[in-house]
Structures are given as C-alpha cells and as structure tokens.
C-alpha cells in the first residue's frame, strides 16, 4: 500500500491536491478500499503525467472493446491547437470552404450549403487533393474565388485571386434593390463578416462597406431604418 500511495503522491498535481489526498486517506475508515476506488476511477495521463478522473478522458474503442484514451482531453485539445496553428494557410481555407458548405451548424451554411453550393467530393475527403488542384496560394493577399458565384467549389470553378482582381472582376456585377436591402440586414445582424457577404452576392468588400456607410444606394436606404439600419 505504501508504494501505491507514493506513486499517487508523485503523480497528483500540486501541493494542495496532495494534502487533500492525504487528509482524506487519514480519515477514511478503510484506506485499502479508498485506494482501490481511486485507482478504479482515475487514470494517469501519458502526456502531462497527472492523475485525473476518468471523465477527463475521451472514450475510445479498440478492436471492438470500449476503453479510455491514454491522453486527457486537455492535452489532446492543446496538441490539436498547436498542430492546427502549424498548418499552411491553404489548409485553413480548405477547412473553411468545407465548413460553410457541409456543416449545418456553421453561421454561413445557409448562404452556401443551404443554397446547394457544395465542395468537390475529392476535396472534401482530401486536403492533399485540394492543394494539388489549386496549388499553393501565391501570396498572403490572394483568396479563393469561385468563377461562377452560384457554382460549386471545384477545380474548374475555383482560382486564386487578389482582392484587387476580385474587385475588378466584380465591377460589372449589378445589385438589385432587394439585394441591397438583404445586405443591409446582414450587416445590421452582425453575424457575418463583410467579406463573406461580398462573396455571397459576387461583389467586393468595398461595395459592402459603401452600402454600410451610405456612400451608395442612398435612394434605397433612405427612410429604411426600421430594423435594418
């Protein structure tokens, strides 16, 4: 029993936790039973080395048998964040287009997936395929652009463009009065960024900004502050 207690003291977090454990052990009528309960309901994380309750670990299945993962949820989350931060910008772009087209919980889904806009099946399952088709992003100023704004994210319909090129490409796009009213509502709602709104309507972000501040479409926006402005 002494060796078990020593191991637990070494692996238990900080000084306060160790004192609490020893106090509990001293006042427990059956120390052996207490130690057995602790061993059965806790687990040492192979990453941080701390003994934590089983609820701190995700469940897993190994060869059809239920089990507990070796690393605690906190360590797994920290590793994922570190890994994600190291990914190239193309990965974040790829992840973003998948999310807004396939994840109904995404705030932008109703403007993409719900509109029938999808992602190439090969791209959905493989970042490598996406990168192979699109190539590296030329510069940090480039963004992914769909040639046909109502089309899908496919190799044939996607390209890298700079924001300046995007503005020039969209210069001939005409917005209707109804479009402007919807844009104003989306701006007021605050749930979407101006770039996302611009992408939906096939215009540039400057156009959305001008509508927001009233530099354009004044004749439509005048007197329409009821729940919109």
Image: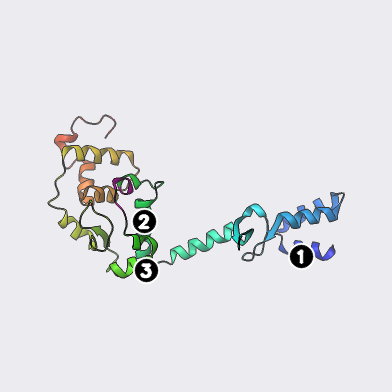
Q: Secondary structure at mark 2?
A: helix
Between tags 3 and 1, which lies in front?
3
Q: CA distance from mark 3 to mark 1?
A: 45 Å
The reply to whether dot 1 and dot 2 touch (C-beta < 8 Å) is no
Q: Secondary structure at mark 3?
A: helix
Query: Is residue 72 in the magenta section?
Result: no
Q: Earlier in the sequence, mark 1 or mark 2?
A: 1
Tell me: 146 left or right of 190: left
Pinpoint residue 81: horizontal percent, then vertical percent.
Answer: 48, 61
Over which residues does the magenta segment extend? Answer: 112-118
Give the residue at mark 1. 7
Residue 136 visible in the current orientation: no
Q: Earlier in the sequence, mark 2 or mark 3?
A: 2
- 219 or 93: nearer the viewer: 93
Residue 96 visible in the current orientation: yes
Q: CA distance from mark 2 to mark 3?
A: 14 Å
**Residue reaching furthest front?**
64
Image color mode: rainbow
**Residue reaching furthest right?**
29
**Residue drawn at 60 percent across, 56 percent down:** 59
Tell me: 220 left or right of 229: left
- 146 or 88: nearer the viewer: 146
**Residue drawn at 36 percent across, 56 percent down:** 98
Give the residue at mark 2. 98
Q: Secondary structure at mark 1?
A: helix
Give the residue at mark 3. 128
């Amino acid at each position: 029993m002494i060796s078990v207690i020593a191991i637990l003291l070494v692996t238990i977090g900080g000084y306060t936790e160790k004192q609490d454990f020893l106090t509990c052990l001293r006042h427990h009528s059956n120390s052996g039973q207490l130690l057995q309960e602790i061993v059965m309901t806790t687990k040492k994380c192979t990453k941080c080395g701390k003994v934590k309750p089983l609820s701190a670990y995700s469940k897993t299945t190994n060869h059809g048998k239920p089990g507990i993962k070796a690393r605690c949820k906190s360590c797994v989350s920290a590793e994922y964040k570190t890994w994600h931060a190291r990914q190239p910008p193309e990965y974040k772009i790829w992840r973003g287009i998948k999310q807004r087209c396939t994840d109904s919980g995404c705030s932008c889904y109703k403007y993409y997936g719900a509109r029938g806009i999808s992602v190439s099946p090969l791209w959905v399952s493989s970042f490598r395929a996406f990168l192979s088709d699109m190539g590296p992003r030329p510069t940090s100023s480039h963004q992914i652009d769909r040639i046909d704004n109502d089309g899908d994210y496919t190799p044939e319909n996607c390209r890298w463009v700079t924001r300046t090129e995007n503005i020039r490409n969209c210069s001939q796009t005409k917005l209707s009065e109804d479009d402007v009213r919807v844009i104003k509502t989306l701006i007021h709602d605050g749930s979407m960024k101006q770039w996302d709104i611009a992408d939906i309507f096939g215009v540039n972000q400057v156009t959305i900004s001008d509508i927001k501040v009233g530099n354009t479409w004044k004749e439509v926006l005048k007197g329409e502050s009821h729940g919109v402005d």
